[in-house]
Image: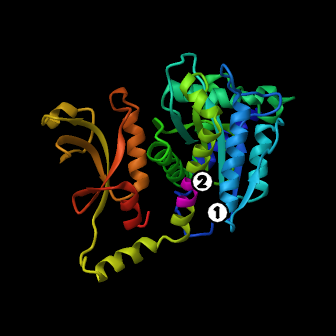
Amino acid sequence: MKRIALIFGILCIALFQPHEIIAQHKVRKVVIDAGHGGKDPGAIGKHAKEKDIALSIALKTGEYIEKNLPDVEVIYTRKTDVFIELHKRAQIANDHEADMFISIHCNANNSSKPYGTETYVMGLHKSQANLEVAKLENAAILKEENYSDMYDGFDPNRDEDYITLTLFQNAYLESSLILASNVQDQFRERVKLKDRGVWQAGFWVLYKTAMPGILIETGFLSNPNDERFLMSDDGQSYLASAIYRAFKEYKFMLEDPENSAKMAISNQESGDLFKYDIRFRVQFYSSSRKKSLAKFKDVEDVMEYVHNGLYKYTSGNEISFGAAIRLQNQLRLNKKYRDAFIVAFKDGERIGVEKARKLSGQ
């Protein structure tokens, strides 16, 4: 009966919850959550444990924020090698009324081949791989005493139990997606790591936090190269710096949404006297030869453009960067387009995504 009541309650939230509006406000508190800890080692590589890597990156991330964003209070769910229950991690964030929740983890796979970074937001998993990642991180519940009572009978190893979580419509989905995309952009562009994308899945710790939240998988401990990078001080510092920069970009976007408009006015005053038409598309295919659009029957709203001597094909033509992120996620579900990425255009000409976001106030 308790589980039925819980599902009914979540359904009510899903049906009556208003669509998110990203309002201008100050970002003053961020919770940095180092995954696992104490008796819960998390993923285990040949030489490292997830709990240790996650803690080191979390502390470095917090240090960057504290040093460079003095108006932001950093709250840690743990600063030492201790076990903190998942529900308590969410409670820490909620009790502090934080503006953002960032949970840091390491990935693992039965194969040593997968490598790269992923960032997750709370939502419906659309692939078995995403579900397995959620199961791996939610398994910490099993190390808690009386976990069945504390989590309303939720079993992290039982597929059907994820219905309870995925029925929940995240009120902060768009904000979470923007920060998650920022993180992956930083990992890809600055740290030069493989970008495995932004995904949705059922993570209990994100489900219970009453604020935008993301869960970052910084690499695979099951992959020798990733593990070596994750164990190095330089690697941890690069990852922490990337997360900090992504957070800073998100904070400034929320706090000064008019800044890009001011930049546009300044450009106009210096001679650029026209209004910008900024569009975001998702590029999924390129070729040295022109292709018939009929080749891409499984993709909607396909457009072609030529760039650096190659024919490139995109889906969508979005004004909203958040809409482009959602479209990218949908395309990446198709195995043929797992490397799909966002590109931006100003008045029909391709420009950098970061520049486009600034010009459009996003």
Residue 49 in magenta?
no
Across and down, in percent, residue 342 comes to 36, 47
Query: Residue visible at 60% across and 27% down?
Result: 227
Q: Is residue 29 left or right of residue 252?
A: right
Answer above or below: position of 98 versus 154.
Answer: below
Label 2: which secondary element: helix
Residue 330, picture quadrant: top left
Using the image, determine if residue 44 lies above or below residue 359: above
Q: Amino acid at mark 2?
A: Tyr
Task: Look at mark 2 in the image and give the residue it sits on.
Answer: 244
Where residue 68 is drawn, which disc sits there? 1
Question: Mark 1 near mark 2, Cβ–Cβ under 8 Å?
Answer: yes
Q: Earlier in the sequence, mark 1 or mark 2?
A: 1
Q: Position of residue 63 (x, y in %)?
A: 70, 54
* Segment tinted magenta in the rendering: 245-250
Q: Does residue 174 sit above or below 334 in this rendering?
A: below
Q: Amino acid at mark 1?
A: Asn
Which secondary structure lies at badge 1? helix
The one nearer the camera, 127 or 98, is 98
The residue that appears at 73% across and 59% down in the rendered structure is 97
